[in-house]
Amino acid sequence: MAFSSGGNKGPMAEINVTPLIDVMLVLLIIFIVTAPIMTYPIDVALPQRVINPPPVLKEPPPPIDLRVDPTNQVFWNNGPVAESQLQQLMEAEVQKDPTNQPELRIDASSDSEYEVMARVLAAAKNADMKKINFVQQQ
């Protein structure tokens, strides 16, 4: 607290403006530095009006249920299938409509061998299947 040096011995009733001036000088310097940056144009890609409406989405095909049981037998939509035929079946499904592929739902038993599951996933990858999900039946 500052005291006056005159005849009055009480505290000064004046505001100390030095910190206010310091803050204003800092803000002025920041404004001077950033103002030229704001004058450069920035390219913004705005969406354009589409004359043709988007195509109507087709209903997705029914999903494919692929199950691997504890004896490592593979089932395609509840029908047994050999592992060697899996990739051919998957390729046939992909070739029907490559843009609207069916979802492949894989349900592998916890007691099945990892190698069987690896071969199933390799067949799906080689057949270029895009929608692969893992499910577990209760």
Image (tube, rainbow, N blue to C red):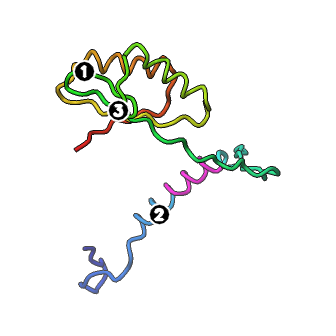
Q: Which residue is mark 2?
A: 21
User: Crowding near pointer 2: few (<14 within 10 Å), some, many (20+)?
Assistant: few
Q: Which residue is mark 1?
A: 72
Looking at the rendered image, the quarter that the N terminus falls into is bottom left
Local SS, label 2: helix
In this rendering, is residue 117 above or below 12?
above
> Which stretch appears magenta?
26-35
Name the amino acid, label 3: Ile
Local SS, label 1: loop
Q: Nearer the viewer, mark 3 or mark 2?
A: 3
Local SS, label 3: strand
Q: Residue furthest right?
A: 51
Q: Nearer the viewer, mark 3 or mark 1?
A: 1
Q: Nearer the viewer, mark 2 or mark 1?
A: 1
Q: Quick check: marks 3 and 1 in contact, CB under 8 Å? A: no
Residue at (61, 34) in percent of width and height? 99
Q: Which residue is mark 3?
A: 106
Q: Disc 2 versus disc 1: distance between alpha carbons? A: 80 Å
Percent coordinates x, y for residue 80 in the rendering:
34, 25
Name the amino acid, label 1: Asn
Looking at the rendered image, the quarter that the C terminus falls into is top left
Residue at (55, 44) in percent of width and height? 60
Residue 106 in magenta stretch: no
Of labels 2 and 1, earlier in sequence is: 2
Name the amino acid, label 2: Ile
In this rendering, is residue 3 above or below 102?
below
- For this view, does 48 lie left or right of residue 2? right
Of labels 3 and 2, earlier in sequence is: 2
In this rendering, is residue 116 above or below 31?
above
